[in-house]
Amino acid sequence: MKTIKTYSCSILAAIFLLALGLDGSAQSKKVEKTYRWNYQVDESVRFSFTNYDCDLIIHTWDKPEISYHMTVDATMRTEEEAARLDDFIDQLEFSRNAGSIQFDNRFWTSKKTLMGRSTITLKGGGNLRFSEFNMKGEMWVPENCVLDLQSKYSEINLEDIQGRLSLDLYNDKLFGAALGSPVKIAAKYSTLEFKEVKDIYADLYNTDLETGNAGDLVVVSKYSNVRTGNAGKIRIDAYNDKYTFANTGDIKFTDKYSDLNAGNTGQLELDCYNSTLNLVSAEDVELISKYGKYSMERARKLNISSGYNDNFKIGSLYALNITVSKYGEFKVSHLESSLLLKDGYSDKFFVTETGDFQGVKVDGKYVDLEMGLDKNLSYRFKANVKYPKFEINEEAMNVRIKVQEGSELQMEAIKGVESEGMPSFFVNGYEMAVTLRDNL
């Protein structure tokens, strides 16, 4: 019995010592270290930084110095490989002079896992085996530096920066404060949020961009969402995107399958295909469109060069001028001055009321026009239509010419008191339907 106890104790002791040995070996395979680089530079230094799979915090300060701290937490297969990795990183140097610095924290050419075996190939340093490999970074840069940041697979937090900023991002999340200078952005599969920016020049793909107030925006995008507070002038080339602004300056919007939402805007130049626009107000609007849906509370002039199967819902509009339209539907609550349709086909117009009205001139086929007019409005009515469908109060008119030959009607009449320059209705075409009703 005594012998058995002694043997059992020996086994336990051996297991305990083995465990200590394994733990010590595991610790020796670990690389847990923060590496530091500090360089004196000009305050307006151009700093190019390439970041890869490394969460990053970027601070700004008033020193003419760049400081970069990179923390590595890696578990290697052997002590020797851990020592080689530590020595390799410790001796990294970056291309630099007082006016320009280039950093690249991807110090390997490849990192891969095959059949459960992970290896990293250092730049000029051979292959190392690892089971875990994580990095994070923190840097301090002069607040007026020019920062060019390229990054992939990372989360980045950026403090206020006054110098110019250029971002080239792939599958990143970037959270920034206020930017005092224009920012240039190229981003794919990324999320960007800023407190405030000056001007934005962006090329976006499947990216979400959100900011507070902004300056001017020039954006090319696909499958992206952009949201800002108040903004300056805007120029957008979009494909299957969603844009939302508060108030803006002038907008040039070229798109397919996209949405634009804005508050008060300036002049609009729109070339749209299967688009949806919702605006509070606009000045003059120049439009080319197919399959569009447009909602505006008010605008000054809407000038349509070409429209096809579009739908408009407008609160208040000064003038509507259309060169060519097919299958359009126009609902206007208040049309102040005039309606001009040079070439319409199967269009429908519904105008609830008019203001200081100057007149209507429509030419087309299968066009329906319904208008509510001030009952005291005096106007001239002229028509040359084949197969007309008119609902007008001829009894209240002085009909001067009415010639109907078969299906064709020529008519000229005066309602109210005739005067020089009085409002006029000119209707010309084929199977035109006109309804004029007096509002009470």
Image: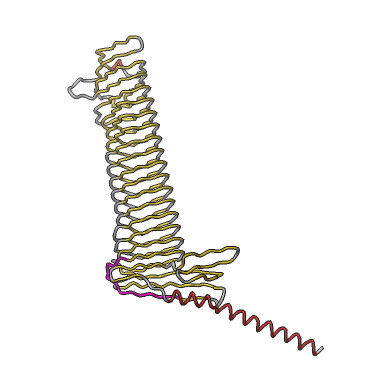
Q: How is the image coloured?
A: secondary structure
x%, y% of residue 309?
A: 40, 31
Residue lying at the far top of the rendered structure? 405
Q: Which residues are magenta?
A: 34-46
Q: Is residue 367 visible?
A: yes
Q: Is residue 79 above or below residue 55?
A: below
- Residue 249: percent from the left, percent from the top? 28, 47
Left or right for 218, reference 83 = left
**Secondary structure predominantly adopted by residues drawn in magenta:** strand
Given residues 16 and 39, the one toward you in this image is: 39
Most foreground residue, 99 or 145: 99
The reply to whether residue 440 is in sight is: no
Whether the magenta-drawn stretch holds residue 302 is answered as no
Figure label count: 0
Q: Residue reaching furthest bottom? A: 2
Q: Is residue 82 above or below residue 364?
A: below
Quadrant hosting residue 2: bottom right
Left or right placement of residue 127 versus residue 15 in this view: left
